[in-house]
Amino acid sequence: MTIPRASSEELESLDMFTHESMHIRGELNEARTECQAVQRNYRAAKLLGVPDATAKRNALEYYHVDYQMRGTIGGMQAAYYSDQCAPGKALDEHLSDSTWAP
Ligand SMILES: [Zn+2]
């Protein structure tokens, strides 16, 4: 079975939902907020009914492609990026269902 691919706009939309939810929890720093979202995009997609394999693939794609581009674009986008947002780095929350959990 092929896993449906989400467009960049669709991935960004899901991330916006997760990102703003992290602000509602009280986080104000944009880089930390976005990293919390990156780690929860897999969980968020599943909550909304996206099948497991699709949710995982899309969340990982967002992290590996869209998120990493922020670090290279710079400017305002850089405020939403941290090189510490990675498995085992400072912003890793070690969630059992993290987007990047094995
Ligand atoms: Zn924000």
Image (cartoon, rainbow, N blue to C red):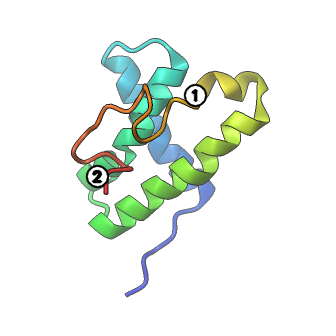
Element at label 2: loop
Of residues 10 and 96, the one nearer the viewer is 96
Element at label 1: loop
Name the residue: 46% across, 74% down. 4
Amino acid type of the residue tagged 2 in the rendering: Leu
Q: Position of residue 11 (x, y in %)?
A: 52, 52
Of residues 22 and 92, the one nearer the viewer is 92
Label 1: how many residues lie within 10 Å, few (<14), some (14-19) or many (20+)? some
Residue at mark 1 to residue at mark 2: CA–CA distance: 27 Å
| Circle 1 or circle 2, nearest the eye | 1
Q: Position of residue 7 (x, y in %)?
A: 59, 61
Label 2: how many residues lie within 10 Å, few (<14), some (14-19) or many (20+)? few
Residue carrying label 2: 48
Q: Which mark is residue 82?
A: 1
Name the residue: 26% across, 59% down. 49
Screen quadrant of the C terminus: bottom left
